[in-house]
Amino acid sequence: MREIGIGIVGGGYMGKAHAVAMAAVGAVFNTTLRPRLDMVCATTPDKAEHYRRAYGFARATADWRALVADPGVEAVVIASPQETHRAIAEAACALGKPVFCEKPLGASLADSAAMVAAAKASGAINMVGFNYIRTPASQYVRHLVQSGALGQITWFRGEHSEDFDADPTRPATWRNQGQANGTMGDLAPHMINAALALIGPIARLSADIATVHATRPGPDGPVTVTNDDIGQFMCRFASGAIGHLSFSRVALGRKMGYAYEITGTKGAIRFDQEDQNALWLYLADDTPGQRGFRKILTGPEHPDFLPFCQGPGHGTGYQDQIIIEARDFLRAIETGAPVWPTFADGHAVNLVIDAAHRSQARGQWVDL
């Protein structure tokens, strides 16, 4: 058992989640590597010092370059805005330091391609953060699909719908500017990652993407929204399965509408992240009088549940997903073997998003 110095770039929502995860992962999973919260970086010295005190870091800085270069920082977590990802990852990879980067991987397809290349050239351990697919329920669904319990998969429907931007009187923020911050850049990656993990590569798609609220209030008058509020696409997976994925930040009533349905020749599954500790399973070989979707509560028999709780149905939460990610990152560092999802997997998601925008622009199906 040894310590490893962790540096986190960004101290906001996700920076805090990763700091908490790194502080807890050793106790939860009894990891061989024990994270030491060495340094945190924020945009100003005052903010950085605030996060240092709040989260228990040893040191703070307002310069991410200083954090990456510091010998006490042995692994880097990027929890800053998308447009900063590439430069930070390239610098860390050049030093051979393991890098965990929040999704989406960079602010563009070019960014993610460059990050994949940098990681490959250096051999540095790399991961991208798609936390929702790590719930015990979704991990179990992945096992059911891969084991053939559902037979040949014929249909997938996925959505990631929230309502944080549903109110047209909500003032404009950074989320309303730039393609990378739109719904296709912000929410879509999570469900696209789920589709790729559960069903496999997407071969072709046809997309429709739109802005619902064209302007929003600003301090000096209306501000033009330059990105999308909603999007959807039909697709054909390489396996032959048909799919439909949809995304929205204006879906009234939906708070964490990360949900999917899978239909196979032997069974079917329904899952909704708003009830993340349960899934609905239908098996075609049940006796006629017992056929129907059954609710399965996650418990110690499901992946990564037992380290958090010994009681079935007691449930895990959002922060626990980040702790599982931290365990996987540490395992990759310890073994030197890639742990899914790597930067290449994050780039694969960006390729689908790029295809969706190309399809929207052309008004036709496009191949990946």
Image (tube, helix red, strand yellow):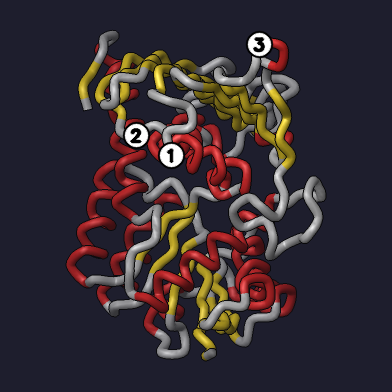
> Which amino acid, mark 2?
Gly
Residue 60 shown left or right of residue 70 in the figure:
right
Q: Residues within 10 Å of mark 3 (few under 14, many from 20)?
A: few
Residue carrying label 2: 200
The image's mark for residue 156 is none
Disc 2 versus disc 1: distance between alpha carbons?
14 Å
Disc 3 versus disc 1: distance between alpha carbons?
24 Å
- Residue furthest toward the front? 287
Viewer-proximal residue among 201 and 11: 201
The image's mark for residue 288 is 3
Q: Which corner quadrant of the image does residue 52 belong to?
A: bottom right
- Position of residue 119 relative to residue 83, above or below, is below
Query: Do the residues under discs 3 and 2 have CB atoms within 8 angstroms?
Result: no
- Position of residue 45 relative to residue 288, above or below, is below
Give the SS element for disc 3: helix
Asked if one can make out residue 222 in the rendered structure from this viewpoint, the answer is: no
Q: Position of residue 335 (x, y in %)?
A: 37, 76
Q: Position of residue 21 (x, y in %)?
A: 63, 67
Q: Residues within 10 Å of mark 2 (few under 14, many from 20)?
A: some
Q: Which corner quadrant of the image does residue 179 belong to?
A: top left
